[in-house]
Image: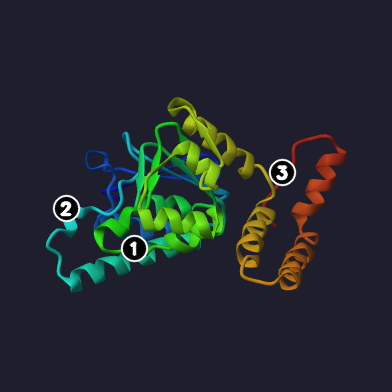
Amino acid sequence: MPQTILIDEPQPGVARITFNRPESANALNTLMGEELRLAWTELAGREDLRCVVLAAAGRHFCAGADLKERNGMTDEAWSAQHVVFEEMARAQLRVPVPVIGAVNGAAMGGGCEMTLACDFAYASQTARFGLPEVGLGIMPGLGGTQLLRRCAGERRAIELLTTGRPFTAAQAQEYGLVNAVTTPEALMETVLSVAAEIAAKAPLSVRALKHVVRAGHSLDLAAAMELELSAYNRLFKTADRREGVASFNEKRAPAFRGA
């Protein structure tokens, strides 16, 4: 039983991971990193999974690394802990279905990086973001520099990273970190509604779309279009494609089976 996170399934095919250290603003400690690494790895292997929501208990999403735990750490201990965090972040990125962030309160440092590692995110009006590592003599190390550049652009990314300046939910939407801003009360309802919408779609198509968009980013246009075509050619031969067309013509909801 995890001690720092909660895992549940609020809807069929939708898993939810909730940070559960509210007394510490959900700061990321070693145990939390280990539990998240395992949770992401297990979810990635589930063929029945359609979508994942990443959320937090309490007032804050994640205040970043637990600096109380890090206080006085040797360089060796710091390095060993960071390996856990690196593996955690990469396990999140390997999940083959969409991961949606539901961000409330502070999402600083590693909390901001885990938001960036989601496929997309929604934020409450209370959310505050930032990558303040430059003021601690370090820098983001969980993909934050590269993921921020991809959504916000190079010039904005360098500004935010080198100043360590916090920014609001509205600014996060402007910069491309989050897709929409809601009231605190509407945040989870909004995210679960989107998750349900995704879960109702053809699961092989959803997985292929995530893969093609992500993998195509590092390819030139011709290669990326070939990647897209390869996925398309696999999908039109599936039973779900036949079910999708049949349900449309029969004016009924499709019953996709992931086959």
Label 1: element kind: loop
Indicate the quadrant where residue 174 lies: top right
Q: Secondary structure at mark 2?
A: helix
147 displayed left or right of 133: right
Q: Amino acid at mark 1?
A: Met
Horizontal and vertical percent position of residue 119 = 54, 52
Q: Of residues 81 and 68, which is closer to you in this image?
A: 68
Residue nearer the viewer, 67 or 170: 170
Mark in front: 1 vs 2? 1
Q: Nearer the viewer, mark 1 or mark 3?
A: 1
Circle 1 sits on which residue? 139
Assess disc 1: are there few (<14), some (14-19) or many (≥20) residues with their C-alpha within 10 Å of its C-alpha.
some
Q: Residue at x 76, y 59 (%)?
A: 238
Q: Which residue is more in the foreground, 243 or 4? A: 4
**Seen in the image, is 130 located left or right of residue 211?**
left
Which mark is drawn over residue 68?
Answer: 2
Left or right: 51 in relation to 66: right
Q: Is residue 118 visible?
A: yes
Say which amino acid is labelled 2. Lys
Specify which label sits upstream in the sequence, 1 or 3. Answer: 1
Nearer-N-terminus badge (2/3):
2
Q: Is residue 41 visible?
A: no
Residue denoted by label 3: 255
On-image quarter of the C terminus: bottom right
Callouts 1 and 3 close, C-beta under 8 Å: no
Q: Check disc 2: other Cα within 10 Å, few if <14, some if 14-19, many if 20+.
A: few
